[in-house]
Image (tube, grey):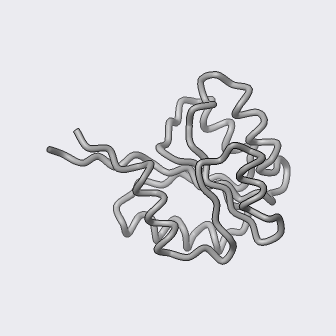
Amino acid sequence: MSVALQPVLLVEDDAEIRTAMRCLLELDGYPVVTASNGAQALDQLRAGLRPGLILLDLMTPVMDGFQFRREQMEDATLAAIPVAVYSGHYDPKASAARLGAAAYFEKPVEIETLLSVVATYCLKRS
């Protein structure tokens, strides 16, 4: 049996947090694609990126996580991609329920929780 790691799409506007989360996930073996806002993330998805999970900060400039999720859900080719939301401002638990997200985190994100959720959606055994 082989194990394939699906990519993670990380949508985070804070460059330091984005770099830290990307490095953490890459050290655990996950390919990571980043976007600094929802519009960039949608562009990447519409260009063919199919991550195992989208890690979505709810507060980003240009297009926030709420608008991103609305547009993602309206696109039949993207709607099934699971999303884990997180925020230091909004209540991520309530937002996750409202947005139909697969998981949620509080900021600062706990490393063990993050890696556990990513493994759930990005580890594919064949």
- Residue at image position (74%, 41%) is 69
> Residue 10: where, in percent of width, then height?
59, 55
Looking at the image, which is closer to me, 15 or 64? 64
Among the 4 quarters of the image, the one containing residue 18? bottom right
Q: How many marks?
A: 0
> Residue 70: where, in percent of width, then height?
78, 36
Looking at the image, which is closer to me, 8 or 117? 117
Name the quadrant of the C terminus: top left
Residue 48 position (above or below residue 69): above
Q: Is residue 16 left or right of residue 87?
A: left
Q: Is residue 80 left or right of residue 90?
A: left
- Residue at image position (41%, 64%) is 26
> Residue 32: where, in percent of width, then height?
48, 55
Looking at the image, which is closer to me, 108 or 47? 108
Looking at the image, which is closer to me, 40 or 8? 8
> Residue 80: where, in percent of width, then height?
57, 32
Q: Is residue 72 left or right of residue 31?
A: right
Among the 4 quarters of the image, the one containing residue 84? bottom right
Q: Is residue 57 left or right of residue 33?
A: right
Residue 19 position (above or below residue 45): below
Name the quadrant of the N terminus: top left
- Residue at image position (45%, 66%) is 115
- Residue at image position (56%, 76%) is 110
Residue 53 position (above or below residue 112): above
Point out the residue furthest to the left here.
1
